[in-house]
Amino acid sequence: MNDQAAVLREKVLKKNQNSLKDCKTIAVLSGKGGVGKSNLSLNLSLALTKQKQRVLLFDMDIGMGNIDILIGQTASYTMVDLLEKKFSIEKIIKKGPQNLAYVAGGTGISSVFEWSPSDLGYLIEELSTLTNQYDYMIFDMGAGMSESVLRFLKAVDEMIVVTTPEPTSITDAYAAVKLAASYSVSAPIRLIINKTLSEKEGNQTYERFNRAVQQFLNVSISLLGIVPDDQAVQKAVNRQIPFLLQDPKSKAST
């Protein structure tokens, strides 16, 4: 399995001969639900498309996904079809707003989806066929850190960890980083502090978090951004329109 991850990494990092750009793979994780991870993954993807980047967003919360719900769409095929029915990845890609390509996670399955080594191998092989078509692949990971998820994280270029200033959220984010470190996941980690009351609170949260991971895990994390608590976000969720499009001048969008 590590060999398969290495194959994907090589293909992702290898420059497309027809382009000067590489495809960058980013996994977004949180360690727990309720911190706004999927919303940030979606709006980050849209921010990149506004910069003329080709983005493919994956909802990796298989069987319990919500990316398509956040944009008010219904996907005909999902990650469940890819892994259970071995559909091609081209078949399950759907176009969202602003030319964003995405793959839905799927909902309503009758049992909890469990990744197998063969599922992971198939996914990696399918991803390797797309590396010349996109500038970014962003993976909105589900809550929890199974062994299959940890194996997958070995194949990405970068991880973004989302937390809020709440102690429970910070504790779970720390646990996610600890698991990744114990599994020798070497991708650089960047932190987003979401739902902050002030920039000062966000900076203080980052400093405490970074000190802890440096001291106890020997891991250094950079701060990617601080996103304020903003009523515009909830209004956008209720309308099933990404907040970056619903209210581009809101605090969260900025």
Image: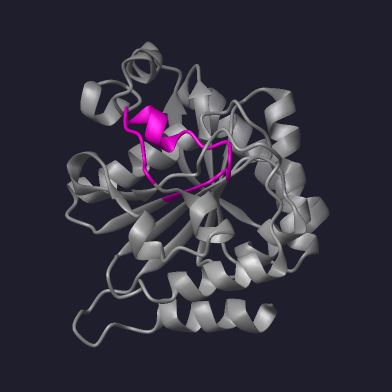
Way the structure is coloured: one colour
* Rendered location of residue 30, percent (x, y): 62, 40
Q: Which residue is pictured at 50% across the width and 76% down the height?
A: 125
**Along the line of sight, which residue is nearer the eye, 122 or 186?**
122
Which region of the structure is painted magenta? 58-76
Residue 183 seen in this snapshot:
yes
Question: Which quarter shows the N terminus?
Answer: bottom right
Based on the displayed image, in which of its 4 quarters is residue 5 positioned?
bottom right
Instruction: Give the quarter of the image for residue 184.
Output: bottom right
Is residue 59 located in the magenta-colored stretch of the structure?
A: yes
Q: Nearer the viewer, residue 179 or 69?
A: 69
The dominant secondary structure in magenta is loop
Quadrant placement of the C terminus = top left
Q: Residue at x 50, y 59 (%)?
A: 82
- Residue 12, given in percent of the width and then of the height, sits at 42, 76
Q: Is residue 248 above or below residue 103?
A: above
**Left or right of residue 238: residue 101:** left
The outermost residue toward the bottom is: 17
Q: Residue at x 59, y 66 (%)?
A: 187
Q: Is residue 78 left or right of residue 21?
A: right
Q: Position of residue 38 (x, y in %)?
A: 48, 36
Q: Residue at x 46, y 71 (%)?
A: 126
> How many marks do you count on the picture?
0
Question: Magenta includes 234?
Answer: no
Q: Position of residue 205 (x, y in %)?
A: 62, 32
Residue 248 seen: no
Choose between 55 and 67: the one closer to the eye. Answer: 67
